[in-house]
Image (cartoon, rainbow, N blue to C red):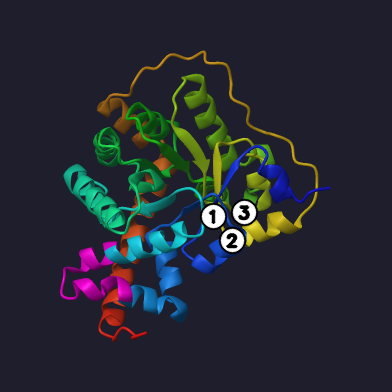
Amino acid sequence: MPALLEQLKRFTTIVADTGDIAAIARHRPRDATTNPSLILKAAQSPQYAPLIRTAVAPARGAPAERLLDRVLVAFGVAILKLIDGRVSTEVDARLSFDTRATIERARRLIALYEAQGVGRSRVLIKIASTWEGIRAAELLEREGIHCNMTLLFSVAQAQAAADAGATLISPFVGRIYDWHKRAVGAGWDEAANAGANDPGVRSVHAIYARLKGGGYPTEIMGASFRNLGQIVALAGCDLLTISPELLEQLATSEGKLERALVPPAQTSTRAPLAEADFRYALNDDAMATEKLAEGIRIFAADAVKLQRLIAELATEPVAQC
């Protein structure tokens, strides 16, 4: 019997969720996603120090956020040499509530990619799924800059992003699971909340039904997995972005895998969410509100740490070949 990974590929596009270029070379996914936390983790490995120093050398003395962008794009360009599809690069989370600044940063990232000969069709700009971030994505999509709406935890966020014409959304399965497990505490029954009953999996099923039933073209990519059961329960989702560790487990695990998500007939009508309705729905969902805020804080803190690491490496000379 084929490994679970090979069976999953029949239903779903596999995306690597990492900044580790070596791991991407091993697995050869179609697409790859990065974020400040993943790039920070990779950047702490000595093997990537030359890439960082080379990226920032032409811009020594530039503001820290510009050096950060150059490093993010350098990792993205290196990843694109190993895959056939797209790479996702994230706008600084500290701009999550500033529509104009998010647009400007996204344009700058795309300009850096284009200067390296990478067309915008191969890049997804990741933006936090705040109301301000969704409005930024709406304008960027009109310019042909494709967006991946991240830190997404609710149907309201998903619908608003789809209403705005976002190319792709990334509901965070594992973080939803984490919140509910922590909320229940000692009474949590792991077996009863596994597979299709996992709260993160249920959230993606609801989002899938809403968007596919409404005929939205937005791609849905499950993200942030904690175990194989969550992945298997979402077979059939447009894309799934998976860590190298879980990709290894899928590649070495056997068992019968069935498609879990099938596009429904288009039955629901589109009724775009107004800002007030979006904000109330998000406020009414404690899990989504808390995880969105927490995610922004974590990504922002890791962006600061990454900037400091870049500053340290930028002072070292670039090796001459």
- The three-letter code of the residue at mark 3 reads Ala
- Mark seen at residue 16: 1
Q: Are marks 3 and 2 in contact (CB under 8 Å)?
A: no
Q: Is residue 253 left or right of residue 220?
A: right
Where residue 271 appears, as percent x and y from the top left, is 36, 17
Image quadrant assignment for residue 286 = top left
Q: What residue lies at 34% left-to-right and 36% top-to-bottom?
A: 283
Residue 191 in sight: no
What amino acid is at disc 1? Ala
Above or below, 221 relative to 26 = above
Q: Nearer the viewer, mark 3 or mark 2?
A: 2
Q: Earlier in the sequence, mark 1 or mark 2?
A: 1
Residue 108: percent from left, percent from top = 22, 53
* Residue 38 drawn at (x, y percent): 44, 63
Q: Which span is picked out in magenta?
A: 54-69
* Residue holding disc 2: 244
Q: Earlier in the sequence, mark 3 or mark 2?
A: 3
Disc 1 and disc 2 in contact, CB within 8 angstroms: yes
Most common secondary structure along the magenta stretch: helix
192, above or below 68, in the image:
above
Residue carrying label 3? 186
Q: CA distance from mark 3 to mark 1?
A: 33 Å
Judged from this view, the residue extending furthest toward the right is: 1
